[in-house]
Image: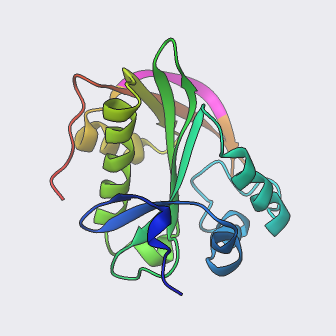
Amino acid sequence: MAIDPRLVFFRGKHVLLKALEERDITESGWVGWFNDAALCEYNLHHYFPVTFEYQKKFIESCISPTRVVLGIVDLANPDLICGVVSLSDIHPIHRHAEIAAMLDKQKTASNPAIFLEAYSLMLRHGFEQLGLQKIHGGSFRPHVASSLVKMFHFETEGVRRRHVFKNNAWHDATLLAVFADTVRYPAI
């Protein structure tokens, strides 16, 4: 089943970002991503099981002035979402927000343009449409943090020592931020 064009929020060369709908829960692998231990090995998911009902409630919570959550669709396989990208905790006074993404590695690992373009589109939306001044995030995987620094010009704001418990070990979390006047968008 094709994506309803009325739900498309952004269209890029490699991806489109769309409003989420109940069909994304039932037809894509979205629920399964959070229940897959291997896929979640290096993120902050897979602590508790996720159900279809839980995801329905999540979609309902996305309709908020403090959150933008969009499904990522690979234009080479345009029937279902292959990931989700979000801006959350959007603060209207201080003009900052947190960015995050979750992708189905089985569908996206061979094409890094999917992540790069989805992240770029969301950063542009935050800076150019929402008027944000700072977008922040983080990772407990050092190579992810260094990749965001190289690709988008994120800066390291600090390290939270032994902040994440995952895979029976404590991990430091690197806190990152990028600013409207210093962000770089990689050529895709």
Query: In this orientation, which residue lies closer to the viewer: 55 or 104?
Result: 55
Horizontal and vertical percent position of residue 85 = 49, 52
- What range of the chain is rendered magenta? 156-163
Query: In this orientation, which residue lies closer to the viewer: 132 or 140?
Result: 132
Horizontal and vertical percent position of residue 63 = 66, 44
Asked where in the image residue 12 lies, by quadrant, the reply is bottom left
Is 186 situated above or below 56? above
Q: Quadrant of the N terminus?
A: bottom right
Q: Residue at x 82, y 62 (%)?
A: 49
Query: In this orientation, which residue lies closer to the viewer: 115 or 125?
Result: 125
Horizontal and vertical percent position of residue 92 = 52, 18
Q: Is residue 140 left or right of residue 30?
A: left
Q: Is residue 145 left or right of residue 26?
A: left
Extreme front residue here?
6
Query: In this orientation, which residue lies closer to the viewer: 152 or 122?
Result: 122
Asked where in the image residue 78 lies, by quadrant, the reply is bottom left
Q: Main secondary structure of the magenta part?
A: strand
Number of numbered discs overlaid on the protein picture: 0
In the rendered image, residue 128 lying in the magenta stretch gets the answer no
Q: Is residue 120 left or right of residue 145?
A: left
Horizontal and vertical percent position of residue 124 = 31, 40
Q: Residue at x 62, y 60 (%)?
A: 40
Extreme bottom residue here?
1
Is 1 situated above or below 138? below
Is 83 situated above or below 120? below
Q: Quadrant of the C terminus?
A: bottom left
Q: Residue at x 27, y 39 (%)?
A: 152
Extreme top residue here?
93
Observer able to see residue 176:
no
Figure colour scheme? rainbow
Observer able to see residue 63:
yes
